[in-house]
Image (cartoon, rainbow, N blue to C red):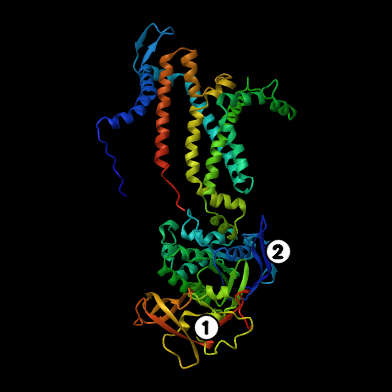
Amino acid sequence: MASITLEGLKKTYTGDVQAVKGVDLEVRDGEFVVLVGPSGCGKSTLLRMVAGLETITEGTLKIGDRVVNKLEPAERDIAMVFQNYALYPHMTVYNNLAYGLKNRGFNKDEIEKRVQVAAKMLEIEEFLERKPRKLSGGQRQRVAMGRALVREPAAFLFDEPLSNLDAKLRVQMRVEIKQLQRRLKTTSLYVTHDQLEAMTLGDRLVVLNAGQIEQVGTPMEIYARPASMFVAGFIGSPAMNMLPVDYLNEQGANGLLDNLPDGTDIVGIRPDDMHLAPPSAPHLTVDSTLALFEAAGAESHLYVTLAHSDQPTVIRVSGQPPVAEGETLRFYVTRDALHPFNSTTGKRTGD
Amino acid sequence: MQTKRMTFPGRWLPFALLAPQVIITLIFFIWPAGQALYQSLLREDAFGLKTTFVGLENFARLFRDGSYVNSLSVTVVFAVGTTLVSMSVALLLASTVNRMIRSRSAYTTLLVWPYAVAPALAGVLWWFIFNPSIGIVPYMLEMVGYSWNHRNSGSDAMLLVILAAAWKQVSYNFLFFLAGMQSIPQSLIEAASIDGASPIKRFWTIIFPLLTPTTFFLMVVNVVYAMFDTFGIIHATTAGGPAQATNILVYKVYADGFIGLNLGSSAAQSVILMVIVVALTVIQFRFIERRVNY
């Protein structure tokens, strides 16, 4: 058990490519932190720097109270779960789990005990004598997790461990990882590009973009108050709609937009904050034409074209409203559903 | 999976298309092999004037002949030595080059060059290096008190031909080992290093076991090479000597047939070689299918 502290961590590749541009972050003891961002944002590089698989160009990395910048991966007391599982194909599941313990000179009884405990926890006892290629994707995933937890390391690092699984299994494994982490209370750093995975797994999220932290916070903090237009667009699905303030004023804002923070020229509205029936609170209205109706069971997504604008906009409503494509829709938005941004800086205004 | 079947409009087109390959095989492989088989049953005088059918007598004589049995054991030593030396050097080079990033392709290119050198030239090259009167290596060995002379020491001669033959084959083995190593996912090596395995331990517990199919394939290829493709090297360096110490089977076929003009015996020897090749090929096809899945 230990915290992980990143201070001004930078990674520069030859040819002046900056993959990570100075990241400060503290992962507290026992916390589950998710690094999330689009591909190429540096989240995997950052994780690999923590693991010791990439060198650190600048900055300090501490695991517990130790500065580990120059330590070998094996000396950092971490375990990692890889995207492709990275199981040793020529070893049985048992030996896959035992390999790290053998290398560290554990005695046979202790290895046996730990492997059995891990196998039981992950329900892979019956596969212990099999080779990885005889296992399904989900089973391999469990073995990979087992290999991480037999060593009882100070921290778990996950590098997109669920992205090779099919959608159903992914949800199931997501729940299992969460439960496991709750039980073991091992500090975890988890990388994903899937915002839903990030929202559901993390105690805290770190949204990365272009090698820099955009925002750190609990999933609901980030969802409720995205610090930038990037975060607003990345977290939440369908993505937040961005509408220029001038346009909304033309459409009849009822004076609701008069007291927005200084510098606001664009407002974000979550698709679920756009109502088809007028709410009792003061609201603004916008007319639009329904271009595409997407029924997703419990909810529906309405892709609309705004009147006098070509801004693509999505409305989310529960159930299936009786609307037809081509129909004119008027939707209503209350003041507290507006997220004010400045389009030049990309930041939230009024903070 | 269903494969698409090709049909031809005429009856003769498929035969015509196959003909070149069939004709080449018949003229250059089947006919000479048949000739050898037939000749191995005959005894012929040195001038080719009279031939007698002797049945399997040529074979029986060979196995009674001490020099043939000696040649067999020389061949085993030579083949095993060449294979071991060339494969272990190639493995070492490949694992070293595999760790490089920027200069990898330059090294790979350079290391492939020896493969392009003709066997006879490779032989002469090493013959110069090890020449007892003018060579650099005997000169240096002299300084540490070893008197190198492959003209009268059988073991020196064997070492020389093994070195020359192995040197030429290192390139080939190197390429295969390097390709094999590069097909091992990087994450496996990373996982092993997180699992606390030192680079040497990683090599022996992860990389080497995963290279097994490559290693096995190369072993067969190298044995075949050492037994059949090294005539030029032997001929240019030791010519089978001294005192038969490097007279491998292939060289003996030549020496007995074309110098000794004992064509019947020479043909019988080449038939035995044919059997060995067939056996090695069977082994290769039987076991080469055993692949490791990642």
Q: Front-most of B96 and A194?
A: A194
Residue picked out by circle 2: A58
Q: Across the whole image, how many numbered discs are drawn on residues?
A: 2
SS for callout 1? helix
Specify the subunit that label 1 lies on: A
Residue lying farthest right? B143
Q: Front-most of B113 and B9?
A: B9
Badge 1 or badge 2: first in the primary sequence = 2
Q: Is residue B215 visible?
A: yes
Q: Are marks 1 and 2 in contact (CB under 8 Å)?
A: no
Percent position of residue A281, x then y:
49, 93
Q: CA distance from mark 1 to mark 2?
A: 50 Å
Q: Quadrant of residue B152?
A: top right
Q: Front-most of A292 and B272?
A: A292
Taking the image as shown, residue A340 lies to the left or right of residue B147, namely: left
Tell me the amino acid under the disc marked 2: Glu
Percent position of residue B153, x then y:
62, 22
Percent position of residue A280, x then y:
46, 93
Q: Image height check: is B17 above or below A238?
A: above
Tell me the amino acid under the disc marked 1: Glu
Q: Of the residues tagged 1 and 2, which is closer to the observer?
A: 1
Specify the subunit that label 2 lies on: A
Q: Of the numbered discs in the image, which one, if any, rests on residue B17? A: none
Taking the image as shown, residue B87 lies to the left or right of residue B275, namely: right
Who's the residue at 54% across and 67% down the image? Answer: A38
Q: Of the numbered discs in the image, which one, if any, rests on residue A250? A: 1
